[in-house]
């Protein structure tokens, strides 16, 4: 289920499983199985380009 929809929330997984446990219990079980459920935040690759880094630094100043 996690491989099919890796961006599913813990609550969505709990509902699909039909589990009556808490989301925290599900989180602990997945962590023990080596399946952490922290969502990854996508990061644009162009942020690594020197010209973009320069513009970002200028904007922050």
Image (cartoon, helix red, strand yellow):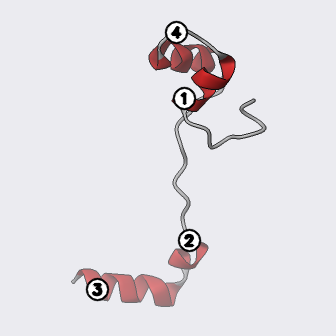
Circles 3 and 2 in contact, beta carbons < 8 Å: no
Residue picked out by circle 4: 21
| Residue 29 falls in image quadrant | top right
Residue 10 is marked as 1
Q: Residue at x 51, y 76 (%)?
A: 47
Residue picked out by circle 3: 59
Pointer 2 or 1: first along the chain: 1
Q: Residue at x 61, y 20 (%)?
A: 30
Judge the density around disc 3: few (<14), some (14-19), many (≥20) Cα neighbours within 10 Å. few
Circles 1 and 3 in contact, beta carbons < 8 Å: no
Query: Dot 4 lies on which element?
Result: loop
Residue picked out by circle 2: 44
Q: Residue at x 60, y 23 (%)?
A: 15
**In front of the other: label 1 or label 3?**
1
| Residue 61 falls in image quadrant | bottom left
**In front of the other: label 2 or label 1?**
1
Residue 52 is marked as none
């Amino acid at each position: 289920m996690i491989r099919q929809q890796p961006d599913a929330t813990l609550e969505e997984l709990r509902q699909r499983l039909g589990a009556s446990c808490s989301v925290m219990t599900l989180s602990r079980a997945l962590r023990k199985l080596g399946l952490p459920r922290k969502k990854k935040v996508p990061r644009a690759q162009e942020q690594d380009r020197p010209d973009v880094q320069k513009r970002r630094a200028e904007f922050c100043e």
